[in-house]
Image: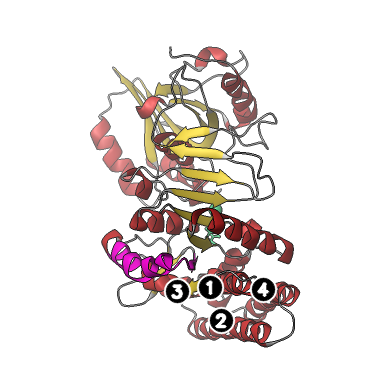
Amino acid sequence: MALLVMKFGGSLTADAQQLRRVVQIIHAEWLAWQRVVVVISAMSGATDTLRRAAEFAQQRDVTAYRRLMSGLRADHITLIESLFAAGTLRQHLLQKLDGYLFSVLALCDGVAHSGALLPQQRDAVMAVGERLMASITAALAQQEGLRAALIEAESVIITDNVHQNAHPLRDVIDERAEHILRPLLDKAVVPIVAGFIGATRNGEPTTLGRGGSDLTATLLAAALGADEVWMWTSVDGIMSADPALVPNARVIPSLTYEEIGELAFFGARLLHPGAIEPLIRNNIPLRVRNPHNLDHDGTLVHANPQQGAHRVKAVTAVDGLYLALRDQPFDLITFLGKVREKVGSLAADPVIVMQSYRRATLVFVVPTSEGPQAVLAAARQLKDLLPEWDVQPVKVIAAIGARTDLRPILSKNIRPLASALGANERRLVAVNPADVRDALQQFHSLTESDAVEA
Ligand code: ASP
Ligand code: MG
């Protein structure tokens, strides 16, 4: 019998009306599929609040973290009280809420006392948002008559001990999922699992990195051999560009696993960067859908490249660093070693490398996860390290989906600093950050035409 894994994002669990809709959808899909696994994210903003609370604790700002925690408590109380009438279920959830929040406060008090925040403490604090929301969703599903069971994510999602960005141990997860989730599915019970969180083999809490609920969903889908994964979110699907920069950006109907990986690498904030990998071996399709627009098909992510003409499907921009050297001998290997050593902490990857006699140009991509200041800080470090080089922050624009040459598309006033045809047919152009909006809009026009392979 077919099996569906569904993940609900934080924007869909923010208020009572939204959460009721989530449970209606679970119900409807359970009627259709009979076998459904549900993964729940924290209420939007909750993970950031918890992270900040842990940081205030480290700074010994007791008032600040207490204020944050009381805000979080108030938001969850409002949600619980509007979903559950006075009675045992409501009481049980309120007690659970206070239990979790007291444990966070106790942890923060300990951190404030010692002034040191251990990575596992940060994880224990940040995990609470998902724990709370999974409990509330499971209780609501049960109240609405669904056969649902709350499953502790830590009993299934087993990881290494790289806190904040833990790596899943796939074999153990497969085994646990088979053992814990399969029997429930066989009885048509819906397991409801908190996303984002896991545990080491020793039971220490870990988290999978920001956006980690996506990964929880695809790991469970792979472990159970699901037929599809649906990511429910408050937008209609994956957009052809950032609508804040390109007003006529549209939802992309379909993408391959590779294309979505490229999009994420080049800066589009889509799914957790590791979330596609588990789907590839079993060829499990993923769909992004909006519960408030069920008539829209959303975006389908799958293995098969689309038949027919290749066209540019999306354009994206990511921070990068441009390095150029003129009129000097240059050895790439020594150079990369030197740069890596100095800016090793930065997960920057070289994406454009052009070299000719006594002339070299390199462009590194700096992942969005490094934060907005990372590029400027790295540029400063590199300028000190390489005084003879021209070092500039740039935006690296990637066109995903076709082998079109991008340069002729640009108007005369935009000068590409470097460009390349990368792996997987991606086209890259580095431009001055001031030109990024115009360049993206000009490249985006390619998504509207039938740009065939060059
Ligand atoms: N709540 C976590 C985050 O904000 C995980 C997720 O939403 O997927 O990153
Ligand atoms: Mg997300």
Task: Specify the principal SS of the magenta part.
Answer: helix
Q: Nearer the N terminus, badge 2 or badge 4? A: 4
Vertical side of 247 occupied by 232: above or below: below
Check whether the beta carbons of the residues at disc 2 and disc 4 lie within 8 A of each other.
no
Residues tagged 1 and 2 counted as in contact (Cβ below 8 A) = yes
Q: Quickly name the residue at label 3.
A: 152
* Residue at image mark 4: 72
At 62% from the left and 37% from the top, the residue drawn is 242
Q: Earlier in the sequence, mark 3 or mark 2?
A: 2
Does the magenta segment cover residue 185? yes
Q: Quadrant of ligand 1?
A: bottom right
39 relative to 152, above or below:
above
Provide the residue span drawn in magenta: 172-194
Percent from the top left, x then y, of residue 28? 60, 56
Taking the image as drawn, is residue 266 in sight?
no
Counting from the top left corner in percent of width and height, residue 235 is at 64, 45
Q: Which residue is mark 2?
A: 100
Q: Secondary structure at mark 3?
A: loop
| Secondary element type, mark 1 | helix
The earlier-in-sequence mark between 1 and 2 is 2
Q: Residue at x 40, y 72 (%)?
A: 154
Q: Secondary structure at mark 4?
A: helix
Q: Identify which amino acid the numbered label 3 is placed on.
A: Glu
